[in-house]
Image (spheres, rainbow, N blue to C red):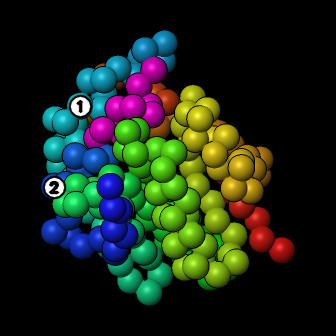
């Protein structure tokens, strides 16, 4: 396995969609909450709404970066970050389950730190994703208690189904 890291392009959308669907299905399915595999199915990820969202995560500008980790031609991880002024928002950080624990996330994280240059970083995360919350805590994030928890509902989900999310912040200085 030789992992290559590079910035994303709009041509990565199809492979990026496949990777994102697999990571969401692994991290966010919770039958007790009603978040079944169908909520994160390939069909949901091919919907116009989801595709439009995913396209925004592949953009690279002076204020936004998106990096991919590839094993040959397969996207196995990604991270996206957007900065404005002294603060940044990480809007996606994913590594395929079979590639976790191999240092890929750590290398993606190092790119984020290089781009943010000691700025505050915020993110939002589903509260039932305990494994990832612990990873972020390890990297210095804490729950941002200045912002309330909120509920997310995807248009493709059954009516009334919501997933609780919270904000986390890594404060510098």
Q: Quadrant of the N terminus?
A: bottom left
Residue 145, given in percent of the width and then of the height, sits at 77, 47
Residue at 22% of width from left, 55% of height from top?
Answer: 74
Q: Is residue 118 left or right of residue 151?
A: right
Q: Which residue is mark 1?
A: 41
Q: Quadrant of residue 132?
A: top right
Q: Nearer the viewer, residue 151 or 141?
A: 141
Residue extending farthest front: 1
Name the residue nearer the viewer: 150 or 132: 132
Give the side of residue 28 with respect to residue 76, left or right. Answer: right
Label 2 to label 1: alpha-carbon separation: 15 Å
Q: Say few, some or many: other residues with alpha carbon within 10 Å of mark 1 (under 14 / 14 to 19 / 20 or more).
A: some
Q: Horizontal placement of 122 versus 103: left or right?
A: right
Q: Residue furthest top?
A: 32
Question: Compared with residue 34, is residue 66 higher up or lower down, i.e. above or below?
Answer: below
* Marker disc for residue 14: 2
Disc 2 or 1, which lies upstream in sequence? 2
Residue 25 location, x and y as percent? 35, 32
Q: Nearer the viewer, residue 112 or 53?
A: 112
The image quadrant where one finds the C terminus is bottom right
For the record, the magenta segment spans: 21-30
Whether residue 36 is visible: yes
Identify the residue at horizontal 35%, vertical 20% (top origin).
Answer: 36
Up/down of 121 relative to 141, above or below: below
């Amino acid at each position: 396995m030789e992992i290559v890291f590079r910035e994303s392009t709009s041509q990565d959308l199809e492979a990026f969609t496949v990777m994102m669907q697999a990571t969401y299905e692994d991290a966010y399915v919770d039958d007790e909450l009603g978040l079944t595999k169908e909520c994160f199915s390939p069909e949901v990820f091919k919907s116009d709404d989801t595709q439009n969202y995913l396209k925004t995560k592949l953009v690279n500008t002076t204020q936004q970066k998106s990096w991919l980790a590839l094993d040959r031609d397969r996207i196995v991880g990604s991270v996206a970050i957007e900065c404005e002024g002294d603060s940044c928002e990480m809007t996606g950080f994913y590594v395929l389950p079979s590639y976790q624990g191999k240092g890929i996330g750590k290398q993606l994280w190092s790119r984020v730190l290089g781009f943010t240059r000691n700025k505050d970083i915020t993110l939002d995360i589903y509260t039932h994703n305990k494994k990832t919350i612990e990873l972020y805590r390890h990297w210095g994030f804490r729950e941002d208690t200045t912002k309330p928890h909120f509920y997310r509902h995807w248009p493709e989900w059954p009516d009334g189904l919501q997933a609780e999310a919270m904000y986390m912040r890594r404060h510098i200085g």
